[in-house]
């Protein structure tokens, strides 16, 4: 009996443990299913969030009207509605995908040419020109998750997100890195043009740092300087020989003074217009504007891009709505810019009372009396930008364009607004772009590496005005006209300790004897804050 009891108990225990294992397996399967479901939901939520961010970004990019002269493409959206857009002549397939995203079509999808049915997969054709699709109606087909459908693949899905994300810098109007090849290409084109008009090196021109604006105006009253390349400049009382840095410093100093005398605005500037203005000065400004770029690669990028386009390419040059929109957003204050970006991507049919009030106040400051709505705001912003940048300063723009020398016009006549926009963005400064210029020695000591990090930290925290002063101190130019800045080190100490710049070859010497960041930053601030004091900015290195 005892043996039978043991057998029965053993059998019960076995059955219990088998049942327990089954229950545990079921619980594990249930737990794993719940985790998979939660993970899938998290991926789904992240996906939807990214889609909304992309749609908002692309709405902002395509908020204005399309080009007036370009490649006209129609799209039949998944809901059956049709829309069209006129792209620039340099647009690629990626731009068409981004336009469709702006119409609240969620990726992944594929564009298809209907007759014969030909897919345009983003993964392989992103950068292909779209000139062949002019006046074509493309079908927008959503991803149907059919793995056997050759029109769709995971790369298309990911590429649509990655490529759209890359366009953020374009929307913000800011190129964050330096393209050395483009800078070199621009320089070669400028020098080749000056050679084609038989430009020759000129004599050395003497200017005074204290009266640089007046001296440059006087120089350009004489037509002969317009055929000089390179141009040689000497600052009175300074020993530096001009190998490029001195002329860049002269043009930078001139434009900084000209901004305050002939232009108005805060972040971006437009020519001043009032009855007391000596309009003949703008003709001289046109000469300086053209020649300073051709010989030194400097453009006054504080002038609003739409205004600059018409100054150089002619008052009748069509300026795209995207350029006007971005210029307006850069023209207003930071908090107003954030307000308008939020409004331009609004998905509601009406604005909130507070948002409507803020938009109306800002637009009213530009003379706009119409109440904005989500559907009319883009058009209102474009109209305000046209008035502010093109119509209001029209007389000054025409005078500056008249000042462009006849011998230089061939160069500017060949340039498109898009090409000038690209140059403008390359010359515009940002902390990230300036930091990308710095080239430190391949092997640095711990002290040198510490000082180099001080430099990067300081530059990363600089405001636009400080960046312009830093670049002028190091390169002679207040714009990004170089592809690199070489960093070297010295052991100066005591009263001799200071940063030393060589503008001709764009080199910055940094002492390694700084004990902390505050001392390093303080010496730079002492130099950059005294831009108008002659003894601080003397060029005495030979």
Image: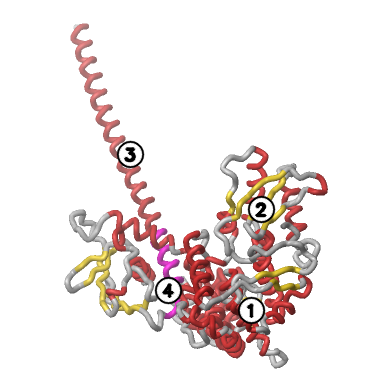
Which of these two is toward me, 168 or 311? 311
Q: In this view, does 107 lie to the left or right of 397?
A: left
Residue bearing the label numbered 3: 31
User: x and y percent of residue 118 in the render?
Assistant: 20, 67
Considering the numbered disc 4 on the image, is that residue within a helix, a strand or a loop? loop
Choose mark 4 or mark 1, whichever is in front: 1
Mark 3 and mark 1: span between their CA atoms?
A: 81 Å
330 or 293, which is in the foreground? 293
Q: Give the range drawn in magenta.
A: 49-65
Does the magenta-highlighted stretch encompass residue 61?
Answer: yes
Q: Are marks 1 and 2 in contact (CB under 8 Å)?
A: no
Q: Give the alpha-carbon distance from disc 1 to disc 2, as whole Å.
A: 31 Å
Dot 2, how many residues are within 10 Å of its Cα: few (below 14), some (14-19), or many (20+)? many
Residue drawn at the location 50% of the way across and 67% of the way down: 188
Closer to the chain start, of discs 2 and 3, is 3
Q: Element type at marker 2?
A: strand
Q: Do the residues labelled 4 and 2 touch (CB within 8 Å)?
A: no
In this rendering, position of residue 457 left or right of residue 137? right
Please tell me how crowded label 4 is: few (under 14), some (14-19), or many (20+) other residues with Cα within 10 Å. many
Q: Report the disc number at residue 62.
A: 4
Q: Earlier in the sequence, mark 1 or mark 2?
A: 1
Question: Helix or strand or loop: what does disc 3 sit on?
Answer: helix
Label 4 to label 1: alpha-carbon separation? 43 Å
Indicate which disc, 4 or 3, sits on the residue closer to the N terminus: 3
**Which comes sooner in the sequence, label 4 or label 2?**
4
Residue pointed to by mark 1: 225
Query: For the residues carrying marks 4 and 2, which lies nearer the camera in this image?
Result: 2
């Amino acid at each position: 009996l005892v043996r039978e009891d043991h057998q029965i108990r053993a059998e019960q225990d076995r059955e219990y443990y088998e049942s327990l294992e089954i229950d545990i397996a079921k619980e594990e399967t249930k737990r794993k299913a719940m985790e998979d479901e939660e993970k899938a939901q998290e991926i789904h939520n992240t996906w939807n969030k990214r889609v909304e961010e992309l749609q908002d970004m692309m709405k902002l990019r395509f908020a204005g009207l399309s080009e007036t002269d370009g490649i006209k493409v129609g799209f039949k959206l998944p809901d059956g509605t049709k829309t069209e857009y006129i792209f620039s002549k340099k647009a690629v397939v990626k731009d068409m995908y981004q336009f469709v995203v702006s119409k609240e079509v969620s990726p992944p999808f594929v564009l298809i040419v209907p007759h014969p049915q030909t897919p345009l997969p983003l993964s392989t054709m992103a950068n292909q020109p779209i000139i062949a699709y002019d006046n074509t109606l493309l079908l927008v087909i959503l991803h149907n998750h059919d793995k056997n459908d050759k029109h769709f693949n995971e790369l298309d899905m990911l590429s649509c997100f990655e490529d759209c994300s890359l366009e953020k810098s374009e929307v913000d109007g800011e190129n964050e890195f330096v393209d050395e090849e483009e800078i070199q290409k621009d320089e070669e084109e400028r020098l080749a043009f000056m050679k084609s008009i038989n430009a020759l090196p000129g004599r050395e021109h003497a200017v005074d740092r204290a009266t640089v604006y007046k001296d440059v105006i006087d120089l350009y009253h004489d037509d002969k300087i317009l055929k000089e390349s390179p141009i040689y400049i000497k600052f009175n009382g300074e020993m530096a020989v001009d190998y490029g840095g001195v002329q860049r410093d002269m043009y930078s100093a001139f434009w900084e003074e000209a901004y305050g005398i002939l232009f108005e605005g805060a972040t971006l500037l437009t020519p001043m217009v009032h009855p007391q203005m000596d309009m003949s000065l703008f003709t001289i400004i046109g000469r300086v504007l053209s020649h300073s770029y051709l010989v030194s690669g400097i453009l006054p990028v504080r002038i609003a891009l739409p205004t600059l386009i018409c100054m150089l390419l002619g008052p009748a040059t069509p300026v795209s709505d995207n350029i006007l929109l971005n210029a307006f957003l850069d023209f207003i204050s930071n908090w107003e810019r954030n307000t308008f970006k939020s409004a331009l991507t609004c998905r509601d049919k009406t604005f909130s009372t507070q948002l409507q009030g803020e938009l109306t106040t800002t637009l009213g400051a530009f003379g706009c009396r119409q109440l904005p709505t989500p559907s009319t705001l883009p058009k209102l912003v474009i109209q305000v930008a046209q008035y502010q940048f093109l119509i209001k300063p029209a007389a000054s723009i025409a005078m500056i364009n008249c000042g462009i020398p006849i011998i230089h016009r061939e160069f500017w006549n060949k340039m498109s607004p898009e090409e000038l926009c690209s140059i403008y963005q390359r010359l515009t400064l940002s902390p990230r772009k300036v930091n990308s210029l710095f080239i430190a020695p391949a092997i640095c000591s711990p002290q040198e590496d510490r000082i180099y990090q001080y430099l990067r930290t300081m530059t990363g925290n600089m405001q636009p005005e400080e960046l312009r002063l830093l670049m002028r101190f190091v390169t002679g130019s207040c714009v990004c006209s170089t592809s690199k800045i070489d960093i070297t080190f010295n052991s100066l100490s005591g009263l001799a300790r200071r940063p030393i710049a060589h503008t001709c070859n764009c080199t910055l010497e940094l002492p390694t004897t700084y004990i902390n960041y505050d001392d390093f930053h303080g010496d730079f601030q002492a130099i950059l804050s005294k831009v108008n004091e002659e003894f601080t900015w003397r060029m005495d290195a030979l």
